[in-house]
Image (tube, grey):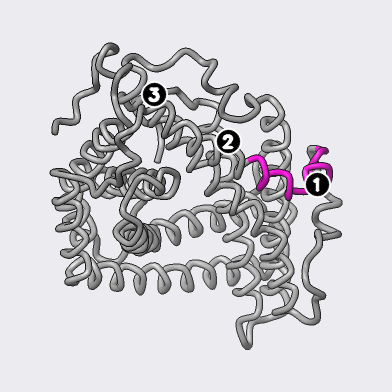
Amino acid sequence: MTDAPMTAQAASTATAGDILSSHLTAQAGAFLRALPAAVGEVGARPGTGAAPSGGTADLLRAVRRIGGLLHTFGATFEQSWAQESRTELRWLLNLLALEPGYVRRSARLLGALDALTGTESDGPGMLAGHAGAPKARALLDRQLTLARTRAHSTVLQELRSARLHALADRMTLLVAEAPLLDAAAGRAGAVLLPQAAAAFTALTAGTQKLRLQRAATPYGGDGLRRLGSVPAARGAMDADTALAADDAPWHRVRILVKRARYALEVCGRPAVELDELDRVLARHQDASDAAVTAATAARTPRITPATAYVLGVVHADQRLEVEAARYAFGRQWPELPPGLDGWLEIPPAEGGWGHTPAPRMA
């Protein structure tokens, strides 16, 4: 089967299996094309890391879409095969995200510290000239470089493993034929639309768990002083647990946004608004992760009080970024179409069913 989009006439009579096989063939092919380039890119980096680009970015894009498709439309696939495939794809996704995650965290934290200590003409930063700033910067740089180097070594080792080769073999077989159940023989709309609608129902339910009212003002000071319903905090580590619990529903909604985006792609609909929502939640997660890193660095043994103070300010700065992302989400979410039916009213991409709109992001 080729990965060419179906004609409008063919799409109108296509089965769910036709549509899903077309998408899986295209994404499995993209996976296999990107894999050698991604392995080469990782091998060429001497532990210094780089943001995903080229083959690595293409591989991440394919992995996310195959995994999302198998989750949302899993009822049409052989269950044990789909679960095993999702497990292996999740392993590779987490592996490939390790090093770029540290790169983004380093850029975010060092950039924030440089801004806080800057002496620009429009006004100095609040930490300008602070005695603890140079040591705090050096500490962050050293710890993140070490973590990035270790992540690089782990990725390099795993990309040579039998587990990756087995996953590549699985994708090769997927290009030829997907293990579909009898239900996939039904008309595409009748079989796939209810499953796509479930992805949007899950997204709506996940968003209802967010405390959007607390993020309704541009400056989320209330969000910094009081957390949501989280476990009682005692001491520094418990405080981290409380923050993690406060952030977790937002991280979960980001996953649900991605699944809804990929479901729309199968339906041949554009998802520009969901793309932007995903970007906002990506900023939220990056700022949350950076704040955790700053707090961890501040507990490094034998650092000076001045250094710890600077790291505490950086932590607060990143939590402000978290609140800014929540505010942006709260402004955008009410403007989105309600449920799948609202999205289906949007004119389809050229080709409709069986045609994947060109992805703008992973």
Which label sits in the foreground, 2 or 3?
Answer: 3
Using the image, determine if residue 229 lies above or below residue 206: below
* Residue annotated with mark 2: 277
Horizontal side, residue 96 vs residue 111: left or right: left
Horizontal side, residue 135 vs residue 167: left or right: right
Marking on residue 220:
1
Q: Is label 2 in contact with label 1 (beta carbons under 8 Å)?
A: no
Magenta segment range?
204-217
Viewer-nearest residue: 303 or 77: 77
Which label sits in the foreground, 2 or 1?
Answer: 2
Residue 145 visible: yes
The quarter of the picture where residue 187 lies is top left
Main secondary structure along the magenta-highlighted residues: helix
SS label for mark 2: helix
Query: Which residue: 60% across, 74% down?
Result: 297
SS label for mark 3: loop
